[in-house]
């Protein structure tokens, strides 16, 4: 029994249970902190207050064993912390039979955890755990089946199939015997599965993404449909205009790579951010590059990138002087890509595409 004389709280806990709680708590608490820990632990963890085993949030007495012949069953002993299930245990009384690739010469508790769905599981301590060594295996007694090993930190995420069992060893190189391990399974969703962006209810498998319609589907990278390149020697600049299509409306960058006469890159690829147009299904972008930055270049390649790592097709175009257009020929409002010859102007208000037309008689305005 634990009694607080200054209050009216009286809690009955078996002597054996109280001794175990106190021994587990000492490394973390003292004074009032220890007393409060005992109150909370006694209320939530059984003893004479009526706690019971099973995965119902009251997992009963802390087990101090669990080896490959009789592992600690996670499903039967776990508790819930919010939405994330966890298991507590102690290595007091455990045997030292296994060792991980990153350590673990002391006594270990073996936990058997079975995946309810195909997904990625994150396994790690809830709080700082000095001396804790964690390692996971697919076959309990086989060191060669080890998937990951970590010292005092959570394991790297592990992909598991539905129904697959992992054996997680809570081992030590010395330190606190008590441990609390959280097991967080994030389901992997397939093509067409319902999803919610940035949600922990599940993530789309590699190669898929959660689209705006609320389902996982393959990412479609943006493509370049047309590439224009022209140089104005007087200004010492090269202009590049790339036209694109992006069904997924997620274009973020365009990469330009300039090549010399031998087909070798004349400079490092230039990556330009174009996020302002990422929501458009059809678009074009234009950039001006100093000739001095790409000396010796005779052609340029362009490629679009998207927000999900997708890389579009590549188009290459030779660098040529700005073209001069004659009457009736297609021109461009940007003279770099097609200026009209003397006596003509580029009519873009009424013509689509724009056409070179004669300048109106003096005194008359342009159309």
Image: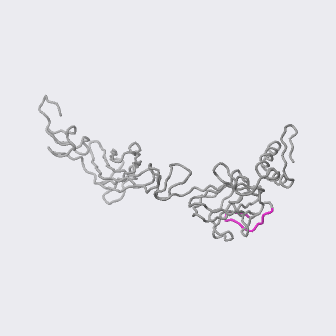
Q: Where is residue 91 in the image (x, y as percent from the top left)?
A: 77, 60
Given residues 224 and 192, the one toward you in this image is: 192
Q: Position of residue 146 (x, y in %)?
A: 64, 67
Tell me what residue is drawn at x 32 percent, y 60 percent.
Answer: 262
Q: For the image shown, how many numbered marks are present on the structure?
A: 0
Q: Main secondary structure of the magenta part?
A: loop
Dividing the picture into quadrants, the one containing residue 161 is bottom right
The image's colouring method is one colour
Tell me what residue is drawn at x 28 percent, y 54 percent.
Answer: 318
Position of the C terminus by quadrant: top left
Residue 198 located left or right of residue 15 = left
Q: Magenta span covers which residues? A: 93-104
Given residues 155 and 173, the one toward you in this image is: 155
The answer to whether residue 296 is seen in the rendering is no
**Most distant residue in the front direction:** 50
**In magenta segment, residue 70:** no
């Amino acid at each position: 029994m634990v009694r607080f004389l200054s209050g009216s709280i009286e809690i009955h806990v078996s002597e054996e249970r109280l001794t175990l709680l106190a021994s587990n708590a000492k490394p973390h608490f003292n004074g009032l902190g220890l007393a409060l820990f005992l109150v909370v632990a006694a209320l939530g963890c059984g003893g004479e207050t009526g706690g019971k085993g099973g995965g119902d949030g009251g997992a009963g007495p802390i087990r101090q064993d669990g080896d490959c012949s009789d592992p600690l069953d996670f499903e039967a002993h776990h508790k819930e912390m919010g939405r994330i299930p966890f298991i507590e245990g102690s290595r007091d009384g455990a045997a030292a039979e296994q060792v991980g690739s990153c350590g673990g010469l002391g006594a270990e508790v073996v936990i058997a955890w079975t995946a309810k769905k195909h997904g990625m599981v994150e396994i790690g301590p809830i709080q700082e755990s000095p001396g804790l060594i964690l390692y996971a295996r697919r076959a309990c007694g086989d060191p060669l089946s080890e998937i990951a090993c970590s010292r005092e930190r959570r394991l790297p995420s592990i992909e598991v199939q539905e129904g697959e069992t992992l054996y997680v060893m809570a081992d030590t190189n010395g330190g606190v015997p008590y441990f609390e391990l959280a097991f967080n399974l994030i389901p992997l969703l397939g093509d067409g599965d319902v999803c919610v962006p940035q949600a922990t209810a599940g993530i789309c498998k590699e190669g898929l993404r959660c689209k705006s319609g609320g389902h996982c589907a393959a990412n479609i990278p943006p493509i370049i449909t047309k590439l224009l390149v022209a140089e104005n020697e007087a200004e010492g600049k090269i202009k590049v205009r790339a036209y694109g299509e992006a069904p997924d409306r997620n274009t973020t960058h365009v990469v330009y790579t300039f090549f010399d006469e031998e087909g070798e890159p004349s400079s490092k690829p230039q990556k330009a951010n174009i996020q302002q147009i990422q929501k458009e299904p059809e678009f074009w972008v234009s950039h001006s590059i100093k000739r001095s930055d790409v000396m010796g270049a005779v052609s340029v390649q362009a490629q679009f990138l998207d927000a999900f790592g997708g890389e579009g097709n590549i188009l290459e175009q030779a660098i040529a002087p700005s073209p001069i257009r004659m009457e009736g020929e297609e021109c461009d409002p940007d003279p770099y890509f097609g200026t009209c010859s003397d006596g003509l102007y580029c009519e873009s208000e009424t013509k689509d595409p724009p056409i070179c037309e004669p300048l109106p008689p003096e005194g008359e305005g342009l159309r």
